[in-house]
Image (cartoon, rainbow, N blue to C red):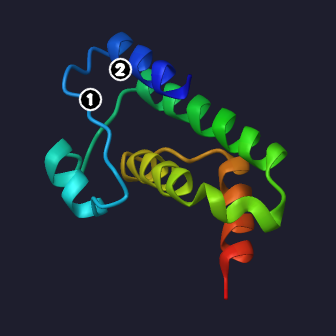
Amino acid sequence: MLLDLLRGAASYLSISNLQFYTDKDTLDTAQTRLGTHNMTINHTTANLLTDLLRELSSELDLHYDDVDLHACGSTIKTLERAAKVMTDAGYEAPEVYHHLVDRFERATRP
């Protein structure tokens, strides 16, 4: 369902080369492939990313206890990449995203 939402968003924003990366890809590799170094995004895209970050972060926050949150590692990394795109473009990620990342870091700390 989330994949369909992302594809719909990509279609709406006329992103024809949307690709999804696996955990094996480093952030630098993904950025090079997507050309996101020093990226600028328009207000519509920022709003869309904010909504996606807020919704997914809220769902994960509500449905996962701290002891189970480690299972969301790859999703958290994807959220971090989206938040980085926003902050690199001068926008802020929503507060619930920061809350979720803080919980994840505390829960997965050795």
Instruction: Indicate the position of residue 49 as horizontal and vertical percent values.
Output: 50, 33
The residue identified by callout 2 is: 10
Q: Quadrant of residue 59?
A: top right
- Left or right: 103 with respect to 47? right
* Residue picked out by circle 1: 18
Outermost residue toward the bottom in this view:
110
Q: Residues within 10 Å of mark 1 (few under 14, many from 20)?
A: few
- The answer to whether marks 1 and 2 mark residues whose Cβ atoms lie closer than 8 Å is yes
Answer with left or right where residue 75 lies relative to residue 88: right
Residue drawn at the location 52% of the way across and 49% of the way down: 79
Mark 2, secondary structure of its residue: helix
Q: Amino acid at mark 2?
A: Ala
Task: Look at 37% across and 45% down and name the residue there.
Answer: 89
- As helix, strand or loop, the secondary structure at mark 1 comes to loop
Residue 29 in sight in this render: yes
At horizontal 54% and vertical 27% (from top left) the residue drawn is 2
Residue 37 rendering spot, x and y as whole percentages? 21, 53
Residue farthest to the top, as pictured: 12
**Residue 57: assigned label:** none
Q: Quadrant of the N terminus?
A: top right
- Image spot of residue 81 (x, y percent): 42, 52
Which image quarter holds the C terminus?
Answer: bottom right
Q: Which is more N-terminal, label 2 or label 1?
A: 2
